[in-house]
Amino acid sequence: NGYHVAVVGATGAVGTKMIQMLEQTTLPIKKVKLLASKRSAGKQLSFKGQLVTIEELVADSFEGVDIALFSAGGSISKTFAPEAVKRGAVVVDNTSHFRMNPEVPLVVPEVNKEALKAHKGIIANPNCSTIQMMVALEPIRQAVGLDRILVSTYQAVSGAGASAIEELQTQAKDYLSGKPADELKAEILPAGGDKKHYPIAFNALPQIDVFGEQDYTNEEWKMIHETKKIMSDDSLKVVATCVRIPVVMGHSESVYIETKDATTADALKELMKKAPGVVLQDDPSQQIYPQALTSMGKKETFVGRIRQDIDVENGFHLWIVSDNLLKGAAWNSVQIAETLHEMNLVRV
Ligand code: 11C
């Protein structure tokens, strides 16, 4: 009894975390199928103490699969998600490919699980930096309304995949062994697909993904558009500056909000204490606040440094941190699968 679950992109930074999250889920699972490119086919990975052989991804891989979790890049999702749906599977897609498609729900379970009811086979998992912000801000939106969000991110290199982690580690070792900064080898960051690459070790790069319209990067546009879709509010003012920093896991965000109704920092702290998926870490007298390092390996979103703005009455500042590969990706995807099961929505 239970579901036949496939992981597409099983060897990637997110795929390996998806397998770990499936080991911990309450979702009933009868079988796990691990899919990847031809290069990885034949290798084995452990699931609940049993070795599972990775299979090459082809359209027929989805025969008999009930739930397919995708995290192998947008072009793989574009080609194979419809093939999975054709064969009766429900797809939870971690890439950006279907996110803004009006037919596809974009879901953070703590925020908008009702949107799952309209699914037609594919559900999109939002961008990591959007997810953690939604978990913290939705309870505030519900209580006092939100007029505007201004976010600056401090994002971990793991968001750009396993090879970006290696790039940071190699550059850090080389720099500490005396190699000058202008000789550090950079081939991936700030964006794999862009013309120039800069070192991330001992640096901060105000570019995540390539540049798009109006000199905002794609990562910044994702935060803007996805926030409006998840909160179902096109009038919400949202703007983002996304920065990569030399941290391996855990995205941090400085978030400024303007609420519609009057509130206080203490009231927001009380809201955060009760918010699903949120842990309040906010005690300046004891130097308690969220940190990337302590968020690593945790499923929750950590919120602290809540303060009223000095000048704007309805303005508030928050510091929001979460493990980008867990709540930002693998855990949110598995949580969507759990929620589909709880809402009896696995079969289309
Ligand atoms: C990063 N947020 O940190 C990106 C990774 O649309 O799912 C996730 C990209 C996405 O580089």
Image (cartoon, rainbow, N blue to C red):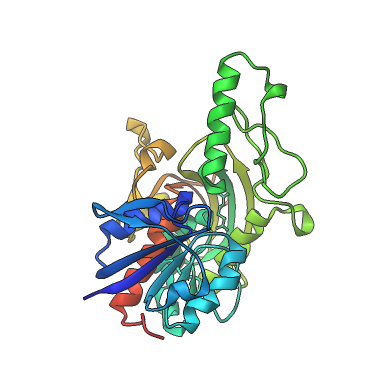
Instruction: Tell which residue pokes out farthest to the left in this image.
Output: 1
| Of residues 342 and 15, the one drawn nearer to the viewer in this rendering | 15
Q: Is residue 196 left or right of residue 113?
A: right
Whether residue 118 appears in this view of the structure is yes
- Frontmost residue, 220 versus 73: 73
293 to 191, vertically: above or below: above
Decide which of 187, 305 is in the foreground and name it: 187
Tell me residue 210's x, y (percent).
71, 51
The residue at 67%/25% (across/down) is: 184
- In the picture, which quadrant includes the C terminus? bottom left
* Along the line of sight, the residue nearer the viewer: 32 or 328: 32
The answer to whether residue 109 is left or right of residue 71 is left
The N terminus, quarter of image: bottom left
Image position, residue 125 (x, y; %): 48, 65
Q: Residue at x 32, y 61 (%)?
A: 276
- Residue sticking out furthest to the top: 178
x and y percentages locating residue 186 in the rendered image? 67, 33
Q: Position of residue 316 (x, y in %)?
A: 50, 51
